Each structure stands twice: as structure tokens, then as C-alpha cells.
Amino acid sequence: MPRSLATGIVHLGCGSFHRAHQALVTQHAIDADRDPRWGIAAVAMSRPSVVNALRAQDNLYTTLLHDGGKVNAEVVGTITEAVHAPSDRVGVARRIADPGVRIVTLTVTASGYCISPATGRLDADCDPVQHDLHCRTRPSTSIGMLVGGLDVVRRRGGAPPVVISCDNMTANGRQLRRAVIDFASLRDQRLADWIDRNVQFPSSVVDRIVQPATAADSAVARNWLGGIEDLSPVSAEPFLTWTIEDFEGERPRWELGGARFVADVTDYELAKLRLLNGTHMLLAYLGALDGHGTIAEASADPALGALARQFMLREQGTTLTLPDTELHRTVDDLMVRFRNPAIRHDMTRVGRNGSDKMIPRVVDAMAENIRAGRPTPGAALLIAAWIRWFDASRAPGAVMELVDPKADTLDELSAIADPHRRAGAFLHRTDIFGTLPEPERVHREVGDALAELARDGVGAAVRRRLLPEFERSNG
Ligand code: CS2
């Protein structure tokens, strides 16, 4: 690594996710070609804790990659500045407009895009967007910051940075572009047109399972650093892919750090959302009902492991363009990743916000399968398990927490005693499930699954849906 780096990247959302992938891939790219232009100004959007921790240790931190009992540690030094957006004196928009900054990246989660799920457009009425439209000097949303920065670049007459979303959403680049242009047009139509013509928003897909670092991680880091305390280590699995849509302009040679550039990320994105994230939901909802605390525990259960494999190969996988051998290889790898005992991916974390995740991760594939005349037992059971977990989390004295933005609007549905009627009421929520083909069939299957889960328990309901070849495979 060169001793000092210039800041060429502004990153919005300085959480563990960013520090476990992009910051690391950038380090490996710089290690390979010694180009010192690509340091990162990493912006924490609200909480100051990570910024304080990083500043106290020259913005250095340790990544710990856990592979079963083995840990691979590395100190990352690509963050040139840790910035706390709400108290930043320079202002994030001005940082984005700095001529040395050629790239802006984001991991702010789907809610950070201020998009209305109903319209797919900027939610111009929500409070944070209204705030940013009225207060140009201190925007609080990533969209307000981007538009503010791009406005400065346009007035100055320079070349704008390329803006890359790394969030786990369908067509993240297109969604971000839409939100930014919608916001700009509410401020100044010429600015919106200029962004439309001049700014690139490539999509990208990141895959790495990251977990909150624990006291045990701090101890591993301390030991590895010869007694030095890391106030903010990052803990993750060894697997990592980052697939980025080709774009024009200067950039780090991320391909030297393991990223891949492709003309279109759509197929990679669908494969990731449906195989990994959809199956995470299956394991989380069924596993939690069955008393498992983590994805690793649930996927090591023979029946649940077998269902996870069957779900990926026979339901989610049938909707993808992956050649058969590659699908099998990916599924084998995923089973190993899910079962990594050093990754404590807990159910309440994977299970939260299910109402937002249902369509892209589960229902889209389910609908395609139904249209093609293929059975969807795993998807129906997954939906039933989500409903059942939801019911359990709302019961008085509940111990099973389920965080969901739509929780309050679902209470009434949970109160319906008959499982088939309850299933129907949930499935009618088009904001969660869209419009499924053959609705009577889906209502019946989800209702049956709900009744079975209550009557016979998870194990029996799962085993009843296993095809003979998966029953024997034990996942
Ligand atoms: C998980 C993801 O919590 C979830 O929804 O499915 O965070 C998953 O671990 C990452 O997408 C892996 O790349």
C-alpha cells in the first residue's frame, strides 16, 4: 500500500458491510497497481460511533474472515477520512463535488433511497425529502447529498463522478438514478436534465455475509495485532463477490482486487437475491419456528437443510439463466456458506423487514414457476412460516421478535382464527405479495401450510414437502 492516499471516492454508509467488501477490494486493487488516487472518504449517515472509533485509530481497522475455526485477519487502510454527516463542517455535497472525487458509492439500505414502493419513484412527500428540498445547505438523505454535490459540479462546469449503488436491491443503479433525477427535477429541471445526460449510475451486486463483531472478535483482533485494541473490527465470511456494470471513466482497478465487470448485472442480481437471500428467508422463518437461533443451526438440521437445497434447485433456480452445472455448484457453495459455524447470522436479523423482501426474493420466482406449471411447495411454506412468526410475535408475552415496517398494519389480519382465511387476508396485501397468478391455488397451499405448521410442527410440514431425492440428501 502507498503510504498516503488521495481521496478519490466518497462512500455513503460507513457500516460493516462497506468495510467488509468495497474498502477491502479497493485495498487489494491498490496493493496490486500502487495507484494512490483511490482513498475513500467514508460517510456515516447518522450514528457517530464508527466514525469516532475509526478516527481514534487513524481510520485503520481489522477485517476478520471466519472460515469454521480458522480466521484470516487483515488491516485495512483505504479509508482516508471518516466523516459523520450530521456534524461534518465541510458538508457531504461539497466532498462529492471535489474534482479529485471520481466515484461515489452507496450502502445505505433500500430505505435510504426514499423510493415509494407503490410507484418506484422518489417519495417526495416523506419528511426527510421535504427537509432536504427546503434546506439546501444541510441535506440529510443520500439523495439530497448527491443532488447537492452534482449541482456544484454542474455549476463549476466539471465532469461528474460516477455513482455506484452497492445496496442489495433489484436494479439498484436504475432505482438510484430515478430517485436522484426525481429529486433534482423538484429543485431545477435543468439540473435534472444535466444529470440525466451526464451522470452514470451503474448497478452492482455485492455478496458477502457480514455479522456484527463481538467481544470474541475484538479479542481475536487484539491477539493478532500483538495487544493493540481495535475499537471497530469487522467480522465476515471468506466468500466475496462484487459484480459491477461496465462504465466509462477513471476508477480503481477493482478487478485486481477480485471484482468483476460485466455488461449487465441482471442475471447475477437475480441469482443472488433468489438463491441466497430467498433461501435465507426460508431458513430464518422455518428455522426460528423450529427453535433454531442462527442460519448455521437451521441449515445443519437435516430436514431444513434438505428443503433449502430443494428450494434452490427446484424452485428459485428454475427461474434463472444459470447453466445446470453452475447452479449445482452455486447451491453446493451456498450450503457450505450457510453452515459456516463461525457465522452467527441470527434469525431476527435475517427475518426482519420480510414484507419488503418478499417480492424480489421469493414471490417473483414463485409467480414464474406457477405460470410455467411448476410446483412451489417451499415458497408456500416460507410464506406460511413468515405469517406464523408474525402471529407469534404479536401474541401477548411473545418471545419471538419480528421487526417489520408494516407490522402495525398486519395486526388485524393476524387476529383471523381460520388459517385459510388468514392466509387469504395476508396474500391480498398486494403491497407485500404483488399479484400472484392462480390466487386460489396459492391461498389454499399457504392456508394448508399454516394449518400444518400449527398442528404438526415444522419438521413434519417440511418432510411432507421433500421430494424423495432430497429427503435422502440431508441437504
Ligand atoms: C441477508 C443478507 O439479512 C439478510 O437479508 O439475507 O444480509 C445477506 O447476508 C447478504 O445479502 C449476503 O450477501
Image (cartoon, rainbow, N blue to C red):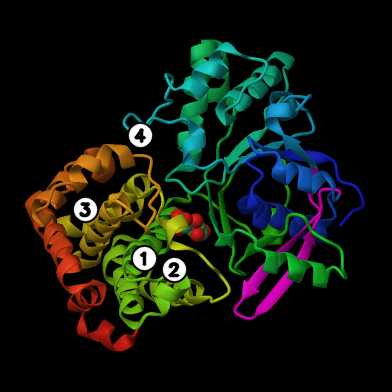
The answer to whether residue 200 is left or right of residue 274 is right
Residue 116 coordinates in the image, percent (x, y): 38, 30
Q: Nearer the viewer, residue 152 or 396?
A: 396
Residue 188's place in the image compared with 10, above or below, is above
Q: Which residue is mark 4?
A: 117
Along the viewing direction, whichever of 350 and 252 lies nearer the viewer: 350
Inspect the magenta stretch and tell me whether residue 160 lies in it: no
* C-alpha distance separating marks 3 and 4: 19 Å
> Which residue is label 1 attached to?
288
Circle 4 packing at 10 Å, graded few (<14), some (14-19), many (20+), is few
Q: Cα distance, mark 1 to mark 3? A: 26 Å
Amino acid bearing label 2 = Gly
Q: Position of residue 71 (x, y in %)?
A: 69, 75
- The Cα–Cα distance between marks 1 and 4, rounded to whole angstroms, is 28 Å
The percent coordinates of residue 378 (x first, y second) are 25, 66
For residue 212, side relative to residue 51 (left or right):
left
Give the CA separation, mark 2 to mark 1. Answer: 6 Å
Magenta residues, as a range? 58-80
- Picture mark count: 4
Q: Which mark, residue 367?
A: 3
Name the element at disc 4: loop
**Nearest to N terminus: mark 2 or mark 1:** 1
- Closer to viewer: mark 4 or mark 2: 2
Tag 1's secondary structure? helix
Q: Residue at x 31, y 66 (%)?
A: 289
Image-based side of 4 in relation to 304, left or right: right
Residue type highlighted by circle 4: Pro
Q: Is residue 268 visible?
A: no
- Which of discs 1 and 4 lies nearer the camera? The answer is 1
